Image: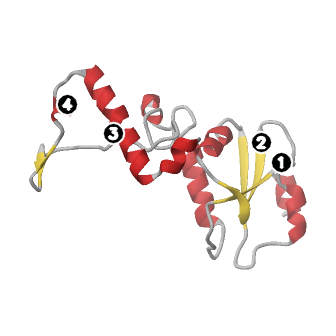
Amino acid sequence: MAKALKSLKVKKGKKNQAIILMTPQGKTFNQKTARDLSKYKTIVLICGRYEGFDERIRDLVDMEISLGDFVLTGGEIPAMAVLDAVARLVPGVVGKSESLVQESFSENSLEYPQYTRPEIFNKKHVPKVLLSGHHANIEAWRKDEALKRTKKRRPDLLKT
């Protein structure tokens, strides 16, 4: 691994880059970490397999990241999740950057409910306010629904 990092011309502590060890012992990955990582020019994700890696590799990394309190056979799937979460925050990756502002975890809340066509599905209607065309009322409804959803499903987010 030391040789691989050297060949990539990356080094622990180097400005504008991060060497990350994917491990269940790391800091739990979240949206804030994804935002922070999206500002780096270079990110190297190191994935262990089965029992992991030699303990001494920890001296070569800037941080250790975990997806949560569970164990997988390797770090590849968590690395893909980190990659996807970070990449979509890089300017130009997502078509409309405004859509990144009103999604789950962007403001310590869950996202408001989404509705598509048809207008009636299984006897359930799209809320009338969403069909009104009144942007201020729609925005107020979305904020209110996001807050309700967060209080019900993830009240821990509101504490932060």
Residue 147 sits in quarter: top left
The residue that mark 2 highlights is 17
Q: Secondary structure at mark 1?
A: loop
Residue 22 sits in quarter: bottom right
Q: Nearer the viewer, residue 100 or 153?
A: 153
Q: Residues within 10 Å of mark 4 (few under 14, many from 20)?
A: some
Look at discs 3 and 2 and give the one toward the viewer.
Answer: 3
Residue 33: % across, % down: 65, 45
- The quarter of the image holding the C terminus is top right
**Amino acid at circle 1:** Val
Residue 62: % across, % down: 82, 50
Residue 4: % across, % down: 82, 59
Residue 31 sits in quarter: top right
Q: Secondary structure at mark 4?
A: helix
Q: Residues within 10 Å of mark 1 (few under 14, many from 20)?
A: many
The residue that mark 1 highlights is 10
Distance from the alpha carbon under mark 1 to that under mark 3: 45 Å
Q: Residue at x 90, y 58 (%)?
A: 59
Q: Nearer the viewer, residue 5 or 67?
A: 67
The numbered dot on residue 145 is 3
**Residue 29 versus residue 56 in the image, above or below:** above
Of the two numbered discs 1 and 3 on the same chain, state the one appearing first in sequence: 1
**Amino acid at circle 3:** Glu
**Residue 103 versus residue 21 in the image, above or below:** above
User: How was this image coloured?
Assistant: secondary structure
Q: Residue at x 47, y 41 (%)?
A: 109
Distance from the alpha carbon under mark 1 to that under mark 4: 52 Å
Residue 112 visible from this viewpoint: yes
Distance from the alpha carbon under mark 4 to that under mark 3: 12 Å
